[in-house]
């Protein structure tokens, strides 16, 4: 489940962010997501895998932008998950 965003980024803004190594709002190319709740305004980079393949039941990683509750990954509001991250 994905919550959405409070704002909108134009194609030019997105291109500028990507050129500068930043992550725009939304989900990047080639990203795979399974059993995940994504809160508002989340920025998930390219080539990210969110699948909890290790079967972790509980984890607190707010500094990395997520928690795991009952095996489900929760990406927190306004979080940035960098390109290539595997959760």
Image (spheres, rainbow, N blue to C red):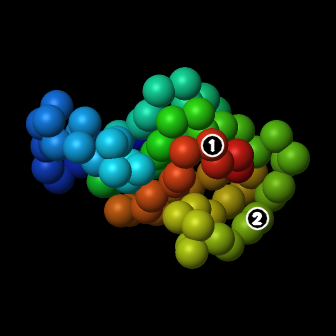
How many labels, in total? 2
Marks 2 and 1 in Cβ contact (< 8 Å): no
Spot occupied by residue 70 in the image (x, y as percentages of width and height): 73, 56
Residue beneath label 1, please? 84
Write the residue at 64% across / 48% down: 85
Spot occupied by residue 73 in the image (x, y as percentages of width and height): 63, 51
- Residue furthest to the front in view is 19
Write the residue at 73% across / 67% down: 59
- Secondary structure, mark 1, is loop
Is residue 83 visible to us here?
A: yes
Mark 1 nearby-residue class (10 Å; few <14, some 14–19, many ≥20) = some
Residue 66, picture quadrant? bottom right
Residue beneath label 2, please? 58
Left or right: 2 in relation to 50: left
The answer to whether 21 is drawn above or below residue 15 in the figure is below
Mark 2 and mark 1: Cα distance apart in space: 22 Å
Is residue 1 visible to us here?
A: no
Spot occupied by residue 67 in the image (x, y as percentages of width and height): 62, 64
Task: Give the mark nearest the N terminus, 2 or 1.
Answer: 2
């Amino acid at each position: 489940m994905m919550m959405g965003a409070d704002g909108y980024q134009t194609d030019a803004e997105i291109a500028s962010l990507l050129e500068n190594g930043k992550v725009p709002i939304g989900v990047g190319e080639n990203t795979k997501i399974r059993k995940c709740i994504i809160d508002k305004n989340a920025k998930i980079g390219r080539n990210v895998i969110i699948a909890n393949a290790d079967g972790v039941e509980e984890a607190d990683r707010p500094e990395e932008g997520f928690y795991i509750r009952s095996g489900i990954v929760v990406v927190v509001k306004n979080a940035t998950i960098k390109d290539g991250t595997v959760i």
